[in-house]
Image (cartoon, helix red, strand yellow):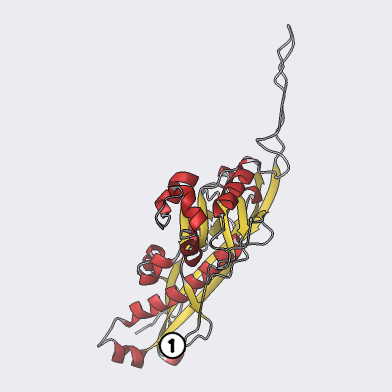
Amino acid sequence: MFLNTAATYSPRITSYLETGASKISRLLIADQVVPKFGVAKQKDSFITDHAETSGDLTEFDVPDRAPNAGYEEITTTFGTDSYATKEKGLEHSLGDVDAATLDDYMNTESVATKRLERVFKKWYEKQVKNFVFDATLPTVTPTASYTIANKATLTPQDDILKAINQMSAVGELPKICVMAQSLWDYLRTCPKFAEFFYGSTNGGKGVTAAMFKEHFKVDLILGNLYLDATKKIKNDTISTTPIWPTSHIAFLDNTGGDLTAGGFGRALYWTKDTPSFWVGETYRKEATRSTVIRMRTNHQLKLLNKRAARLIVTSSDVV
């Protein structure tokens, strides 16, 4: 019997990876923060009108038209940008003997796929965090550091309004606010922040995400996924750190779709190589009597418009 050693596209595994069926999927926020967009070429140049030195805020006079004269004309200067996607991938080997033994207790292919998904998507989550909390993006200096010692007097609403107003001043409006869950738990119980919503007689109430959205007109997206730096398996030996640290709060316009639609950035993936962002494949490795499951992507996190982002640098000691 001939066994195929070439990698074969697996619709079943790909569907699982795209839908995020594992329990870790509810903790992942990368797709909410940076929208995905498929491109036809692995690398290419494109036209953009999001020039950071001009744009929709440029002032023009609109004079009266003189008799027998033409109208005043304006011009638009377009810029160019480029991208180049790169392939990333991981594999998980399933030995025939182990699979035959374990199949009496579990679906070994399913377990291996879930393992690949957890490892790969946590890696991608960290890449998106680095992309969003990039020190080269425009920043807001807070009125005070977001420390435990400053909690009683901290007024984070001043910093939030400053970030939103600074974006408005350059013709942008944030759609989302991204921060660590632990930082939000700290902020929502800051007395001055609660007083801003409830008044001076708030009775120790905490601020809710719905209240935040209603007042500041942005969706609150909270990161609450941790990584084990020790790479151990046993629960009693792990040492975890959050992927999304408390060092920054990001306000972003996360508009998706075509690159001319605006927004902070995109996760561009090459559709000729990967018809969906995540692709699952399988192949036979007969030399080791094993079946291999592969998960891969071919993408680039592409910054489109710095003006569509503001970072509050919190200098927080909250963990």
Q: Observer-nearest residue: 226 or 122?
A: 226
Q: Residues within 10 Å of mark 1 (few under 14, many from 20)?
A: few
Secondary structure found at label 1: loop
Q: Observer-nearest residue: 155 or 30?
A: 155
Amino acid under disc 1:
Ile
Most distant residue in the front direction: 201
Q: Position of residue 298 (x, y in %)?
A: 55, 65
In this figure, what is the number of numbered marks?
1
Q: Is residue 107 left or right of residue 35?
A: left
Task: Answer with the quarter of the image where residue 53 lies.
Answer: top right
Instruction: Give the position of the N terminus as an image quadrant.
Output: bottom left
Q: Observer-nearest residue: 259 or 128?
A: 128
Label 1: which residue? 233
Note whether residue 145 is visible.
yes
Q: Position of residue 296 (x, y in %)?
A: 50, 70
Task: Answer with the quarter of the image where residue 155 lies.
Answer: bottom right
Would you place residue 80 above or below residue 8 in this image?
A: above
Q: Position of residue 262 (x, y in %)?
A: 58, 45
Residue at image position (50%, 85%) is 231
Most distant residue in the left direction: 104
Q: Is residue 99 left or right of residue 296?
A: left
Residue at image position (51%, 54%) is 192
Q: Position of residue 261 (x, y in %)?
A: 56, 43
Task: Answer with the quarter of the image where residue 56 lies.
Answer: top right
Q: Is residue 89 left or right of residue 104?
A: right
Would you place residue 192 above or below residue 111 in this image?
A: above
Note whether residue 42 is visible.
no
Residue at image position (38%, 76%) is 114
